[in-house]
Amino acid sequence: MPLLTRLLAVLSLLVLAACSTKPVVWAPEEAVQAARYQAGAPYEIVLFNVITNDNRARGEHSALMINAPSQRVLFDPAGTWTHPAAPERHDVHYGFDEAQLYRYTYYHARRTHHVLTQTLQVSPETAEYILRLAEQQGPVPDGFCAKSIIAILHQVPGFEWIEDGFYPNALSEQFATIPGVREERIYSDAEPTERQQYTQ
């Protein structure tokens, strides 16, 4: 029976790996440590939603910035943004300072899309716990960005009520009902070719 269980576990991992088109990324420890950035208080989480500018206003990507006492990181599940100064491990980007936040936001904000940010202050302990959960999440398959964030939040006391699902807009709508959430929408007229600067 233990052998069968192990075989099923390996098979599950292979199926998950096959679902994602993004190669596994695991930055070396020295790069992660060198990039570590502490923003200090207030400790908070910031939910990103990349939304189309057409009449449908469709949410197309979710991500979560986590500002914990130990460091500030970005959990960008199945995301496409990268930067040499923000080493990545399984969708978690380290060294997420103000310059990287700007690059990330304006990589997504363009003529066809804008970015909704929803900021919620949390206790230092909660921020640290969410950061650890993000690190443990592993590489996220395409299309599972919102679902993977919900999976993390479901493990945090006070967030269990959020309904499971795949849609960034549904996640944002629920997140907006939490007392204390601050919202901002970021727009840009940048063309796709201009967006390349935010990965350099």
Image (cartoon, rainbow, N blue to C red):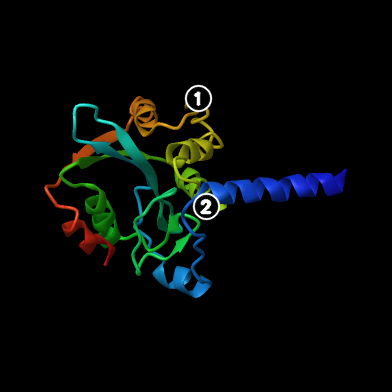
Asked if residue 162 is positioned above or below residue 199 in the image, the reply reads: above
Q: Amino acid at mark 1?
A: Trp
- For the N terminus, which image quadrant? top right
Is 114 on the left-hand or right-hand side of 163?
A: left
Residue at figure coordinates x 62%, y 46% from the top left: 15
Find residue 16 and report its horizontal and vertical position in percent. 59, 47
Residue at figure coordinates x 47%, y 52% from the top left: 21
Residue at figure coordinates x 44%, y 49% from the top left: 78
Asked if residue 37 is positioned above or below residue 183 in the image, the reply reads: below
Is 183 on the left-hand or right-hand side of 77?
A: left
Depth check: 48 or 189 in front? 189
Find residue 3 and report its horizontal and vertical position in percent. 85, 49
Depth check: 182 or 32 in front? 32
Read off the residue under disc 2.
Answer: 139
Is 61 on the left-hand or right-hand side of 12?
A: left
| Alpha-carbon span between mark 1 and mark 2 | 25 Å
Depth check: 23 or 48 in front? 23
* Mark in front: 1 vs 2: 2
Disc 1 is placed on an element classified as loop
